[in-house]
Image: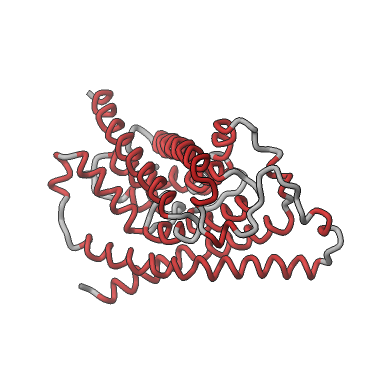
Amino acid sequence: MDYESLILIFTAIIYEALPFIVLGVVLAGLLEEFVPQQAITKIIPRNHVLAIALGGLLGIVFPMCECGIIVVMKRLLRKGLPLSVCVCYMLSGPIINVVVISSTYVAFTNNSIYGSALNVVLLRCGLGYLVAVVTAVVVEWQYRKHGTKLLHPSLTRGLRAPDAADEDNGDQGKRSWMQRLNNITETALHDFVDIMCFLIIGAALAALGRAVLREANMETLLEQTPAVAILLMMGFAILFCLCSEADAFVAANFSMAWPPASKIAFLVLGPMLDLKLYLMYTRVFRTRLILTIVTSVVVQTFVYCLILHYVGKLITY
């Protein structure tokens, strides 16, 4: 094994993710200090399905890639946003935002599949939104059954109910700018340290996995077995730990031997589940909820993309 390449891959993952981690913790600190709980809860419909559907579009308002979205999601949850809505935002936000949509379009402009780069964008966003909403509905059902037992103890301490009054409202006007800045800094620093240790572990595992996979040559098998190709690309998405703002360029440059649906699977699953994200999930969710989310996104991505493959072949012929 080439240890120099291993180190380069590891540092590249950290270098790629670090700016978005910083952006995420700063945004989380600003949300904690300046956004009252009532301002968020009032815009969320009381109907759970409509609330989840809206949550899947929050990435347009709070654009973040998956590297920094966990800390933002935690703060939204602590502000009183329902768990299912937060999960829907967490899963769809790294796909449905202006930066990722633009990067996906550019990446597939000269490497077009499914007719045009716009079709790739629509398929990625559409399937990502569908997977996120269905998973969030399942999470809502789990939450009604198990409540806060699904959440990590560090998160449940001081967790506000969605209809609770905002305790900080009375103090907001009395704080000086220095006090507010200090609160933002403390919040951001705490989240940064909490997330970075798991990012480093995830990056190390991803670098090792990518180095091993690079030595295997399986493209011949993929041309004849689309199900295997989709599963392998999903595995690559989990192991590679790419940022959603850059993963489209990697997918677009995979060999043409890979079925187009497998590349869509890579683009949909990667921002929802990879090694670093799984480790970050352990700081927010209990094992039961992590398994629910992982099973839901993996099964849905595989089934939808397999259907997409055969539908695409029917349309082609």
Q: Position of residue 245 (x, y in %)?
A: 46, 53
**Residue 300 position (above or below residue 36):** above
| Front residue of 93 and 171 | 171
Q: Position of residue 106 (x, y in %)?
A: 44, 46
Q: Quadrant of the C terminus?
A: top left
How many circles with numbers are drawn on the protein? 0
Q: Is residue 272 left or right of residue 22?
A: left
Q: Residue at x 25, y 66 (%)?
A: 211
Rendered view: 316 above or below 207? above
Residue 119 visible in image: yes
Side of 80 relative to 278 (left or right): right
Where is the N terminus found, in terms of image quarters?
bottom left
Q: How is the image coloured?
A: secondary structure
Kindly tell me whether residue 98 is visible in this rendering: no
Task: Give the image quarter of residue 186.
Answer: bottom right
Q: Residue at x 14, y 39 (%)?
A: 224
Front in this rendered view, residue 282 or 225:
282
Question: Can you say whether 299 is above or below 207 in the image?
Answer: above
Residue that extends furthest to the bottom in the rendered view of this protein: 4
Query: Nearest the camera: 51 or 231?
Result: 51
Instruction: Please name whichever residue, 232 or 7, is drawn nearer the observer in this view of the structure.
Output: 232
Residue 47 in the image: state x and y as whole percent: 61, 30
Q: Residue at x 85, y 58 (%)?
A: 173
Q: Residue at x 53, y 54 (%)?
A: 69
Q: Is residue 5 above or below residue 296?
A: below
State the image coordinates of residue 221 (x, y, percent, origin top left).
13, 46
